[in-house]
């Protein structure tokens, strides 16, 4: 299915947020996620289903100042 990941269209086979993160190379990375502008806690990612056209934001913390 096609979704938008951080503003760029992506084709994924995953149907859940957790599987999508793994497919997109974020596997065990510490990131924050939002789907369609709604924050999704890490504990809820396995149950959060994705559908065609969803907008996924993946944010990773940065160090330094």
Image (cartoon, rainbow, N blue to C red):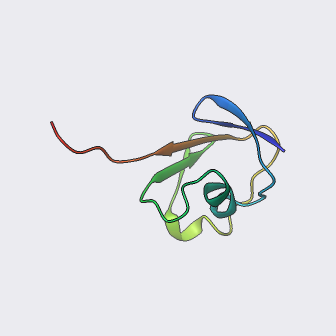
Rendered residue at 78%/58% (across/down): 15
Rendered residue at 58%/53% (across/down): 25
Residue farthest along the front direction in this orientation? 25
In terms of depth relative to the viewer, which is nearer, 40 or 60? 60
Q: Is 34 positioned to the left or the right of 19 in the image?
A: left
The quarter holding residue 16 reads bottom right
Residue 47's spot in the image, x, y percent?
Answer: 68, 68
Residue 4's spot in the image, x, y percent?
Answer: 69, 35
Residue 34's spot in the image, x, y percent?
Answer: 55, 47
Q: Quadrant of the C terminus?
A: top left
Residue 45's spot in the image, x, y percent?
Answer: 60, 64
Rendered residue at 29%/43% (across/down): 62
Label count reads: 0
The quarter holding residue 55 reads top right
In terms of depth relative to the viewer, which is nearer, 32 or 8? 8
Residue farthest along the left direction in this orientation? 65
Q: Quadrant of the N terminus?
A: top right
Q: Is 2 positioned to the left or the right of 23 in the image?
A: right
Q: Is residue 9 above or below residue 24?
A: above
In terms of depth relative to the viewer, which is nearer, 57 or 64? 64
Rendered residue at 40%/47% (across/down): 60
Q: Is 11 positioned to the left or the right of 25 in the image?
A: right
């Amino acid at each position: 299915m096609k979704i938008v990941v951080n503003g760029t269209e992506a084709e994924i086979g995953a149907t859940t947020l957790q599987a999508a993160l793994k497919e997109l190379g974020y596997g065990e990375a510490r990131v924050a996620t939002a789907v369609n502008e709604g924050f999704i806690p890490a504990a809820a990612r396995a149950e959060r289903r994705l559908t065609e056209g969803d907008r996924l934001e993946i944010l990773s913390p940065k160090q330094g100042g």
